[in-house]
């Protein structure tokens, strides 16, 4: 084994762990912030956009976790490990897509009825 390969095998687990921790922190912070906003909306009658904030935080956290999973592919030594890692990557990617799909309606501008669409070439 050459020195570069050994260095990658030594450093990569630390990088993967850091990315995993970053993802966990982002998801946890987003969940706590969304819960606080929910309490404010419920009891203080505020109108904070907690759904968009939570979905954005979850998507960002999943991106960190997905980056860690992609880096894990470098450390694969057997086909069975590859199958397990592929399934984890697929599940995390699907969750990320679902969160982005649910966020789209939250970002659409609200139009009053009778107003023309901005996309028309009139």
Image (cartoon, rainbow, N blue to C red):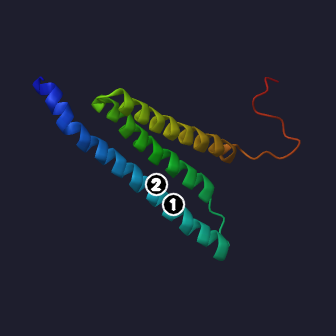
Q: Is residue 92 above or below residue 1?
A: below
Mark number, residue 74: none
Q: Report the front residue among 79 and 22.
A: 79
Q: Where's residue 87, x and y in %? A: 47, 35
- Name the residue rendered at 67%, 48% in the picture: 106
Where is residue 60? Give x, y as percent.
Answer: 47, 45
Q: Is residue 57 left or right of residue 119?
A: left
Spatial CA span between label 2 and label 1: 6 Å
Q: Which residue is mark 2?
A: 27
Quadrant assignment for the C terminus: top right
Dot 2: element: helix
Q: Which residue is mark 1?
A: 31
Viewer can see residue 67: yes
Q: Quadrant of residue 43?
A: bottom right
Viewer-closest of 79 and 98 = 79
Outermost residue toward the bottom in this view: 43
Q: Nearer the viewer, residue 12 or 36?
A: 12
Q: Which residue, as the protein is rendered here, is positioned at the far left?
A: 3
Residue farthest along the right direction in this orientation:
114
Q: Position of residue 67 (x, y in %)?
A: 39, 37
């Amino acid at each position: 084994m050459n020195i570069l390969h050994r260095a990658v095998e030594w450093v990569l687990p630390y990088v993967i762990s850091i990315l995993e921790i970053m993802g966990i922190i982002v998801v946890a912070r987003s969940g706590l912030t969304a819960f606080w906003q929910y309490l404010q909306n419920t009891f203080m009658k505020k109108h904070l956009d907690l759904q968009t904030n939570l979905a954005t935080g979850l998507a960002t956290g999943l991106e960190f976790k997905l980056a860690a999973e992609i880096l894990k592919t470098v450390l694969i030594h057997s086909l069975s490990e590859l199958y397990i890692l592929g399934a984890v990557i697929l599940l995390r990617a699907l969750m990320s897509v679902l969160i982005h799909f649910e966020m789209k309606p939250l970002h659409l501008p609200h139009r009053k009825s009778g107003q023309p669409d901005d996309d028309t070439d009139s």
